[in-house]
Amino acid sequence: MTTPSRRLLLVHAHPDDETINNGATMARYVAEGAQVTLLTCTLGEEGEVLVPELAQLAADQADQLGGYRIWELRQAMDALGVGDVRFLGGAGRYRDSGMMGTPANEKPRAFWNADLDEAVAHAVAVVRETRPQVVVTYDENGGYGHPDHIQAHRVAMGAVDAAADPAYRPDLGEAWAVAKVYWCCYPRSVLQQGIDAMAAAGDTSFFEGVASADDIPFGVDDEDVAAAVDGRAFITQKDAAMRAHPTQIMVDGPFFALSNNLGMEVLGTEYYRLVRGERGPGGAAPNGWEDDLFAGVA
């Protein structure tokens, strides 16, 4: 079997993070014949359960949510066509740490408390096996400050560096240099578009208390954005993948009520900051942004 010429690795903290941030991107590259690998760092055991009849799965009850979310993730990846799904160190090796400052941070298996060298070594093994030209993960604040997102960022960036070093753990495979690393992001202009659309629709509950995109801490300036991947042709797949995570995503909430207008339109284009590698030529995306994460990759 031949190895696909384009290979993408995404490193995420919990099941559902990949679909929200990159679902359309993943579906697009699968359809284009690229190898797409998802590396998830925890099972999301501390997540809030949005399905009342499954409330007993929660961490403060039966504590079985992690196993259920493995099943949700499999369904979501089936919807996107992604066949290579892995957990860092194996399923359940690291536990969801919960939100910053909560008791869950102190649990022995919490990913926030993981030995970073050990966690990086697990990720290096994946990088050297799959040999991606492009890696996608979070920024240094994990997007919004979740400890597992921050730790996933540290692991991904550490693995990119270590995987390229021939002297680092040759037992984990032959050294591999990743060409480009992107961090997921949300341009302020796009966030403002969503705020304005919700206001025009007469529903401000989704952005309650927010008058401007400048008030949203995870927004980034448009000039810091490098790529806008147009995955609108795959929005049906992304919608199905989001619906495959019912314990975590309420797809029929107020924002998604605009699904025939702006809501799913916005979710079909996904944005990235380039932090390693050379920016390729701009394409059909606005502002001279790349429209292909592999732009400029030989």
Image (cartoon, helix red, strand yellow):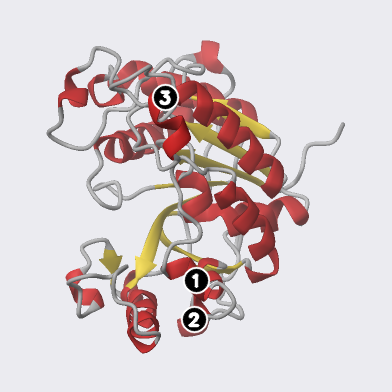
Is residue 275 visible in this depiction of the protein? no
Q: Amino acid at mark 1?
A: Ala
In this rendered view, identify the residue nearer to me: 96 or 204.
Answer: 204
Residue bearing mark 2 = 288
Q: Is residue 227 above or below residue 140?
A: below
Please provide percent x and percent y for residue 164. Answer: 48, 32
Nearer the N terminus, badge 3 or badge 2? 3
Give how far across and how far down residue 124 sits, in percent.
48, 25
Of all residues shown, which one is farthest toward the front?
A: 53
Q: Who's the residue at 61% across and 31% down the image?
A: 85
Q: Which mark is residue 274?
A: none
**Image side of residue 206 versus residue 79, left or right:** left
Give me the C-alpha separation between circle 3 and circle 1: 28 Å
Q: CA distance from mark 3 to mark 2?
A: 46 Å
Image quadrant holding the N terminus, namely: top right
The residue pinned by badge 3 equals: 57
Whether tag 1 and tag 2 are in contact, CB under 8 A, the answer is no
Q: Which of the numbered marks, if any, corresponds to residue 257?
A: 1
Q: Residue furthest bottom?
A: 200
**Circle 2 SS class:** helix
Quadrant (top left/top right/bottom left/bottom right) for the C terminus: bottom right
